[in-house]
Image: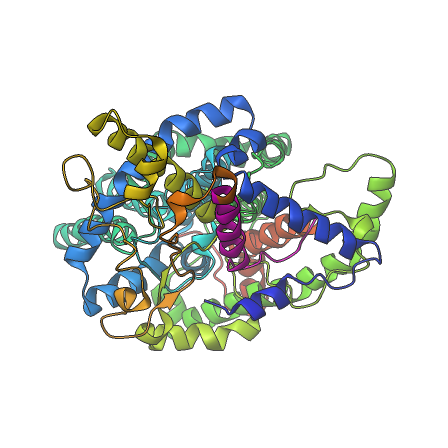
């Protein structure tokens, strides 16, 4: 995890107009004030129709915490830490964005198009649900979060996008293997079936093992992934036929529907980056449909046995030319991103200012409007899907040395984590007092607090039965020190040291207790990684950049291959 100093530096907005620093200070104070009203934060930020379902689901998330902690503690080993943190990369957006274009360039257009449909829909709708209900990840501590991606923990927990991606790919792969058109040898078919099932199971179990998700998150994520794949399997061919054989009206309708979905994407209560990934994959879907429609009319595609297939035959091309196609295609993707992204970030702000002056802008929470900055800084770290060229060396290093690249973090990592920690502590503090009153009807509240001083989560190790049900699974004042959280083989990153009340808490007046809580809350929020400044033009920039990347995979790459002598002519053999 980046240092606090580094995070603060990243959060500084470049090129802002003079009045903006004052505006930012006000926003920062609002966030801290919201933290002081932790129990009312989501009630005030969410409409009732989103808040009430969240309140019904929160007890389930909290119930899972001790069970997840016990499971993680029983299973953990250095080897499993490395395995699950490394294989988690196989369920990320980056892996699929690198892998999927290769399917198109190597002639597996139908498979690639189907996978894009289920994966893009999975990323979009899982992000939609995350921002809809703003449910946190399982609490840390007591869980330890093992990851190679520092941005993942900043998102909400429900549902698990990794699980959605993994299950959708596995279900779709099994369908393709069992389709009547499949010509895979029975032995290879069995191997691929086992690999698909093991892949999905490993990703799902890994999200629980790594402390990134609970049972409920992966269950709903898996159901969502399976449902999207079933829809693709049943209706995908009809949809492709609608796009390929229709006029330009067909892809236009699809693009408009996608843009409407982007516009109505729920605004989160906290600064969560889920929307960014949803926008990126909405752009991928737009590019795939537009490219598929146009490439089918270019005269360069094979129309049989599937629609708009990129011409490919390994025996005719040979391995050298096939590898050259892949390398050139990858270079096209990175070149497009490196050229278009900075160009759009320079061109779009003046356009957005004009639109804003006409009152036609659609501002989104946590995004700075164009009238409040002069320019968008270069090297903006706004993309967790396709890395920039400058990030490739560090990416390759993390692949070669997974043990060194993974981190084990303890403590709140996002605003959602912090608010949930505070709310969970308050809830358990109330339960603790209620248990004591039931066990000792004559005891007053003051003496109850004195006898049961809550720890970081508001939990005491004693109760009416002599032991709290979650004692031993959550840290207590006696054990809340850094030694408790040492890694088995490497130093772990403690993001926030658990705070414990002083022994004199019970003798304080309620107002003094509240002031102590406020102090602890401010300290907690001060230790969180500061979210970077996000600019309104980034939404359109992402849509255009990722639409172009998908178009390169479907049409731009094949056209270039044919132009430079790496393509095939004629009909499929």
In the rendered image, residue 223, in percent from the top left (x then y), is placed at: 31, 34
Camera-side residue: 165 or 570? 165
Taking the magenta stretch, the answer to whether it contains residue 524 is yes
In the rendered image, residue 53, in percent from the top left (x then y), is placed at: 42, 25
Quadrant of the drawing holding the N terminus: bottom left
Say above or below: 179 vs 367: above
Does residue 148 appear left or right of residue 202 in this picture?
right
Tell me where the magenta segment starts and ends, as one range: 513-536
Camera-side residue: 237 or 385? 385
Q: Residue at x 60, y 49 (%)?
A: 547
Does residue 497 appear left or right of residue 193 in this picture?
right
Taking the magenta stretch, the answer to whether it contains residue 194 is no
Quadrant of the drawing holding the C terminus: bottom left
Camera-side residue: 153 or 123? 153
Residue furthest left in the image: 187
Does residue 426 appear left or right of residue 343 in this picture?
left
Q: Residue at x 61, y 65 (%)?
A: 8
Residue 413 in sight from this viewpoint:
yes
């Amino acid at each position: 995890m980046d240092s606090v100093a580094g995070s603060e530096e990243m959060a500084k907005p470049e090129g802002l107009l003079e009045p903006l620093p004052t505006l930012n200070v006000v926003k920062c104070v609002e966030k801290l004030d919201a933290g002081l009203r932790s129990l009312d934060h989501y009630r005030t930020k969410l409409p009732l129709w989103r808040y009430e379902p969240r309140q019904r689901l929160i007890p389930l998330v909290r119930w899972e915490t001790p069970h997840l902690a016990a499971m993680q503690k029983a299973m953990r080993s250095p080897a499993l830490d490395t395995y699950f943190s490394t294989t988690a990369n196989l369920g990320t957006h980056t892996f699929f964005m690198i892998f999927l274009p290769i399917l198109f360039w190597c002639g597996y257009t139908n498979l690639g198009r189907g996978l894009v449909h289920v994966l893009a829909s999975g990323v979009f709708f899982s992000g939609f649900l995350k921002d809809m209900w703003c449910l946190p990840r399982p609490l840390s501590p007591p869980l330890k979060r093992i990851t190679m991606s520092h941005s993942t923990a900043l998102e909400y927990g429900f549902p698990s996008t990794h699980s959605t991606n993994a299950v959708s790919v596995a279900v779709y792969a099994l369908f393709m293997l069992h389709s009547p058109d499949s010509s895979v040898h029975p032995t290879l078919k069995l191997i691929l079936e086992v690999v698909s099932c093991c892949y999905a199971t490993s990703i799902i179990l890994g999200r629980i093992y790594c402390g990134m998700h609970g049972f409920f998150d992966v269950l709903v994520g898996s159901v969502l992934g399976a449902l999207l794949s079933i829809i693709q399997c049943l209706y995908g061919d009809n949809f492709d036929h609608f796009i390929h054989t229709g006029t330009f009206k067909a892809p236009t309708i699809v693009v408009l529907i996608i843009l409407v979905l982007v516009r109505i994407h729920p605004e989160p209560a906290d600064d969560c980056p889920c929307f960014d990934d949803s926008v990126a994959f909405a752009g991928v879907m737009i590019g795939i449909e537009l490219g598929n429609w146009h490439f089918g009319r270019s005269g360069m595609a094979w129309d049989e046995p599937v629609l708009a297939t990129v011409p490919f035959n390994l025996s005719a091309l040979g391995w050298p030319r096939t590898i050259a196609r892949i390398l050139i295609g990858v270079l096209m993707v990175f070149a497009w991103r490196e050229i278009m992204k900075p160009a759009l970030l320079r061109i779009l702000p003046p356009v957005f200012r004009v639109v804003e002056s006409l009152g036609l802008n659609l501002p989104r929470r946590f995004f700075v409007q164009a009238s409040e900055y002069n320019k968008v800084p270069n090297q903006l770290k706004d993309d967790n899907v396709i890395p920039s060229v400058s990030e490739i060396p560090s990416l390759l290093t993390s692949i070669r040395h997974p043990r060194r690249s993974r981190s084990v973090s303890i403590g709140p990592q996002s605003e959602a984590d912090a608010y949930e920690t505070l709310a969970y502590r308050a809830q358990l503090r109330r339960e603790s007092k209620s248990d004591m009153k039931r066990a000792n009807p004559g005891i007053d509240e003051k003496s109850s607090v004195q006898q049961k001083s809550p720890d970081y989560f508001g939990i005491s190790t004693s109760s009416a039965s002599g032991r709290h049900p979650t004692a031993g699974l959550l840290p207590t004042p006696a054990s809340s020190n850094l030694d408790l959280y040492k890694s088995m083989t490497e130093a772990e990153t403690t993001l926030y040291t658990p705070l414990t009340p002083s022994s004199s808490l019970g003798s304080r007046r309620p107002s003094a207790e509240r002031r102590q809580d406020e102090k602890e809350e401010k300290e907690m929020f001060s230790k969180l990684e500061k979210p970077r400044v996000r600019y309104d033009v980034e939404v359109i920039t992402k849509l255009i950049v990722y639409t172009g990347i998908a178009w390169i995979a479907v049409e731009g790459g094949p056209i270039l291959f044919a132009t430079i002598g790496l393509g095939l002519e004629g009909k499929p053999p």
